[in-house]
Structures are given as C-alpha cells and as structure tokens.
Image: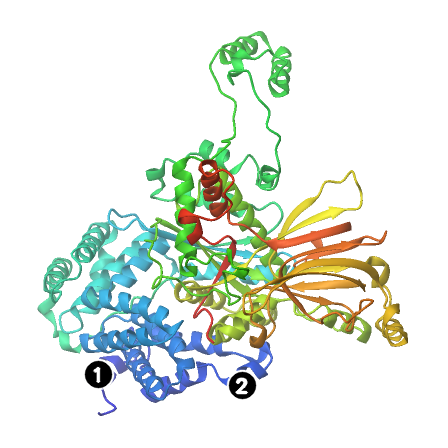
Amino acid sequence: MTNKAPWDNSSRPCSMDPTAVCSPTVPEPELYRSIQAVLPKETDYQQPPDCLNKGMLRWTLHKKVQNNPANSLSLVWVLIKELEKAERWDCRKYIIPLLHTLMYAIVQTAYIPDELYKRVYDFCKRLLTYPHPYCTVGLSYTRQIKTERFIPGLMYQRMVIAEQRLKNDHYPFQERVFVLADPEIFTGSLAQVLLGDIEASASASGGFLSPLDHMRSVVQHSIQAALGAEQCFGTKLDQALKDMGHDIETYFQEVLSTLEQSVEEGGRGDGGPLRSRLQQLYSEIVTDTDSEPLSREPLYDCPLPNPEMSFHLWTEDLDIWRELAKWLRSSSMSEQFSLSQEQEDFELGESPGDLMPSDKARFSVMSNDSGIERDLPPTADPFLASSLDTAGMSPSWEQCKSEQESLKLSRRGGIKMKPSVKDSMVLMQDTLEDHASLGAGGNGEKGGRRGMTLQRRAGSSAMQNPFTKRQRHFTARIVVMGDDRVLGRLATAYYFFRKREARRLFLTMKVNLQFYYIPVCTAPTPVSPVKESLHQSKGNPCTLGSYLSMVDPWYNCNIKSLGCMIPKLANMQQTNPGRPKDPFVSDVISYYVRTGQQPVYFTIYFVKLTFTSMTKDPVEEVFLTHLEMEFPEFKQISASVREKQKQRSSGEICGSVVSLNYKKVTLSGRDVDKGISVRTSGVQISAIPTNEAEDLNCLTLRFIESSSKTKNNSVESKIRTTNIKIRTLESRSFTVILDRDCRRTYKAVQSIEIFPCLDPGYCIQKTIRSKFNLGEDKDSGLSKYMSKGLPLPINTFAGIIN
C-alpha cells in the first residue's frame, strides 16, 4: 500500500493556489503529528490540569482543516489508518478519541468516496465484538455511517436544521444548548469572557449568520456530498446560491424533502435516484456548468456552525424549567402542542420561586362550593374582596365595567390531585427506557441479597433495552459550569422537576433532557499556611469532575482542562482588549454536546433533617456529591490540640457522642444492618469515589478523627453504606452542609436520615399496583423492571472505561 491514497487530492494545483478561497493544504505528516499530540497518555494524570492543553490542540487541529475540503479529506484518511493501527496493536485507549475525532471530521467534510465510508463502517462493525463501552459507541456510529454512506450529507443537514431551528415541513426535531454558570465562580471578567465567547460563536467573519445563510450551507453541502468534485462546480454553486436571495428557501425545502424521502425508503439501492435528483437541482441552480472544466475546481467549504446557545448565571431567581418552556413557546414547531402562556403559568407555577413551595406537603380540604367565583360570597376570597374594594374607589363607569366582568363565569385555578393513566404511563415508560439495562434486579431484595450491584451505571442501554425510545421533537442540552455546588443545585432542581412532573405532566412529553458538566473552580489565591491546611482539609471542590476525568480519558483531555483555560482567557482578554475574539469555549462546548452521548449515572441522595427545636418542622433535601456534619463547638479547636487529645487516651477524643444506624454494603450483596455509638467532632459523607479501586456506587463515611473508638472496639476508618441515620446523643446540636455549598447550610440539627431518592415514575406505578393488591408490598408487573432510585445522568464521551 502506498502512502498516497487515490482520493487524496492534496496535490491538485487549485488546492495550493494562494488566491483560492481555501486555506493552504496541511501535509499528511503534520496531521499525523497533530493527532498523536492530542491523544491521551498515561502521564496526563501525573500533570496538573492547568498544564494540559490537549483540548486546545484538538481545537487547533479542527481549525486547520475547517477551511479546506482537501484538508478534511486528508484528516479522515489519516484517522482511519490510525484507528486500524490501534486495533492491530490493541491500543483501546486510543479508539474512542480517534473515533470521535473521525466522526466530527466526516460531518464537516464536503465529499467522501464510498471506499472510505466502507472502511469506517467495517471498523465500527468490528467494535460490536468489543466490551462496553466500545460496543455501545461502535453501535451508535455504525448506524450513522450506514445511513450516511447511502444518503451523503444527511448528518450535516439534520444537525444544522435541529441546532439552528430552521423552519421546514419534513424534519421537526430541534435542539438548544443552555449554559448555566455558577455566579459564585463566574464573577466579573469570567462571566463577560464566557458571554462574549458565546456571542462571537453566533457570527461568522462576515457578521451574523441568518437562517438563509444556514439554508445555503445545507443545500451546498448536500449537493457536494452526493455529487463530488467531478460533477459539482463548488465555487459557481456557492455564487449562484448567494445570488438567489430568499428564493433559496424553495431549493432548501426540495433538498430536504429528497434526503428525508430516501431515509423513509430505507436507503435501498446504490443511491442512484438520490444523486439523479440532486444533479437535476444542481443543473437548475447553476445554468452554465460547462463553461469551465470541472476537474480543476475544488469543492467549496461549508463550516459547521455552532448550535444555538443561551448563557445564564444560575442565580436564585432563575428557573431553568421556565426557560425551557419559553423556548418551547417561541419555537417554530410549538404550535403543534398548543402551548400558551396561560398553560405554561399553570403547569410551572406563578413565579420562579414556586418550584419548592409547590412540592411541600399539603393538607387535603374538602370543598363544598362549585369552584365558580360568581357563586362565592364577596368575602369568601381575599383576592376577590380586595379587587372589589379597589373597584369601590373607582369612578362609576369603572364600577359598571367591574360588575359586568364579575357576571362572567370564571373558574379559580386548581391543582390536579392525581395524575391520569396516560400521564402515569408516560412517566413509567420514561423510567423503563432509562433503567431497563438493570434488568429485573432493581433495588429489590431476595433471600437477604441486594438485587442491584455496586457498579456504577454508565452508557446508553440501546443494546440491552427492549423498550423503544419515545421520540421527542425537542432536545434541551443543559451544560452546567462550576464546582460541586452547582451540581448540587442541578440535582435539587432535577429532583423537584421530576416530582412536579409526576403531579402535572408537562415537559416530559415534549423535551428530551441531556445534562453536561464542565468543572470550573475558583482561582487559587495566596493564603497563610494555617488557612492553606484548612483549605486542603475541605477536599477537592470538583470531585465529580475529577471522577469523570478518571474514568473517561477523552473527557480529561478536552473538558477538565477547559476549566483551567477559562481564567487564562479572561486574563488575556484584559491584557489585550482589542484582540479579535476566537470562540474557543463555545467551540469546545459544541464538540462536547455533539459527541458526548454516553451518560454516567450518579445517584441523588435524599436527606431528612430533624432539628432540636420542637417548633421547627423537619426539612427534606437532596445532595449529589458530599455531605458534611460538624459540631460548631469543636470546629475552632486547632488540629494540634486535637492530636494531643488523641494521644492521651482513646476515650478523650474531642467531640460529641452520636449514634449511627446504617446498612453496611458489601460486594457480595449480603448487606448487614449495624448500629454503633461513637464520639466524634464531625463526619464527612462522600458519594463520589476518589480513585478507581474504590469506584463503588454507594456512600463512604469518614470521621474527622483518624482513629475514632467506641467503648469496646475500634470503629472502621471507612463505612460504606446506602442508608444511614445519625443522631446526637447529647444536648449538643450539629451543622449540616450539603454539596460544600454554604447557601445550603442547616444549623441546630439533631438527626439526619440519608437514603437514595425514589424515582417518581416508580412511585406512581407502585401506588397504582397497591390499589389492586392490598397488603402486598412486593414489586410485580412492570414495576419490577424499574429502578427505584433517581440518578442524574451526566454525559461524557465514553462513559466509564475500565
């Protein structure tokens, strides 16, 4: 085999013409070196995150080939050879990074010969024999390449239409990226840099891109991908499309209809009718195709625009679910759902702060009125009475008007007390789709053994899921940026969203939610040695981001390093304010949301806090990563004094006596109920492991003291459990901090009870079954196939690579 491929057109004179619209051709050896530089290495974990610049190198690689179709084709050729080499040498750690880079290049390449498509398809098929997650990623890309091979340009067309919300009659799917940044971290220049980067990504070098510009790109790319350079005059086609103006919409609809019709036909045959129809459209657009020889004309580049993004500082006043509803209402396809402002206000509440109160416990009150305001006495409703008092002070014509309005029949807003059967089935189907890979185990117990394993779930269950995925026309890609605190807020919002959907189904039927996470920490500041040791004792502020970097090397290269780059970009922007803005952050976010489709599931834990004051009601909260319990009286004692007290006697450990009742989990599944009393000054409970050896889906409890002891024996240094109850046995109360967020601090706490959150979909099915099976608490029917827990899925590139 020669190094020169027959489809490599890098030697064409037009490609090297400096006056051409294309950028200079990048030689294959340079592409090879760039690919080797971005691949993950074993030494990456030994370097600090701010030293890793592989995400910048990958971005630079795609920028090199973005403006020249010959470069894109050469990159595809080099990546295929590298994938086949990694397969021969069994270098599996390179397969998923190379495959993601290859598919991202294929989408943007103007024309790919069938021989290259076949090699990519055959390689992806061979991945189906690999273990998870390679087989899952391979199955997804096998399906895409199979369709793209017979319908060239389909991936580019669908991606642009969905991400840019182009109006059409054939492809109703739409997507939007919501970037939520923690205001505690993104303050001042950081927020301005991120906002400016996202705004810059919405425009090209020539200015803002309109829907007509996107339509022209779709038509250009679809025709070039099907016909190739031998039958398509790229430059003339581009000029003809620009001269059309608004008439381009007709050809856009025609091209879209042609490709989607081929999809409905299953891509049968050799694609002859598709190419014939696109050739006919090309002849209509470009009338003088024979004026110059086609063999000397390169294809015109159609860069893939970044998806629509909206940037939000996630303050207390922001309700992300209301933002989703606004997007639905403003969407071009929302008229299918008849979503009005009144319906949105009823389903989501009257204010952004209505999320939490709407989920608090209610006392049922039997009503004996008709519910119609006209039938009520004027003083029965304070809101009605106040409106009548206001009308009494108005002029006479205002009184007549108010009397006429009061004669109209109007019903007061009510609450749907129980979901309908249809709503219950939608939630149940949603739960079955996400958790069918767990099989019949669920969280149930048989013969004293736990049905579920301690292995964390990861990856889509497309290969094991017998239930068809419910297609939703809208996809909201929610990207959160910050440390563990913003993830705690996300888990809380998601938990109460599911509870609200269980009562009043609204967004679940319409929107597919996808979550992404970019770890960003506050910039370190010089502190004294005492404060530095205290800061180190608090642990890693981005534990979940560090875990994802540990299990997914490509996430570590592209996403974790991005969090360290953002402060540097802010400093560069302040130093050179007039420097042109390159949308680096938004480009990385676009790459992440497009190729990161393998979720890792994190259990959301429920915590019930009881206070020492009898007049204060218990509080129900959730956390995702970390819970810290400490006694304020002993927090001020320095570490040296505490060490001296430990050395004197085991019974003189500084702290208060607490009782722990928990279920000790084991790998064998034979969990044991235990109870101990111990003196301690505090407890730290972590839900995220710090190393691969302890990668178990459970809680790890550690005492602040290194060697706590009871009266009879020593306490384990680590307690692994999924359910635990802690109660103080003295008059002292303790303080609880959730997800390291000082805004979620609870004081004067007497006891806490922690267990995994129950999925509302499971609870509804369980309630329905209990009505027909009185006294039977055993899971039966479809409920035994459902997961009891409510996990939060965070998308990554590979899931978990063992």
Point out which mark residue 527 bears. none
Label 1 neighbour load within 10 Å: few <14, some 14-19, many 20+: some
The residue depicted at 20 percent of the width and 57 percent of the height is: 263
- The residue at which mark 1 appears reads as 12
The residue depicted at 17 percent of the width and 59 percent of the height is: 266
Give the SS element for disc 2: helix
How far, Cα to Cα, is label 1 from label 2?
Answer: 40 Å
- Across and down, in percent, residue 392 comes to 63, 11
Q: Is residue 130 above or below residue 322?
A: below
Q: Is residue 760 visible?
A: yes
- The residue at which mark 2 appears reads as 43
Name the residue type under label 2. Thr
In the image: residue 566, left or right of residue 703: left
- Across and down, in percent, residue 170 comes to 24, 49
Instruction: Please tell me which residue lies in front, 559 or 499.
Output: 499
Name the residue type under label 1. Arg
Instruction: Please tell me which residue lies in front, 347 or 426.
Output: 426
- Across and down, in percent, residue 794 comes to 49, 61
Picture quadrant of residue 514: bottom left
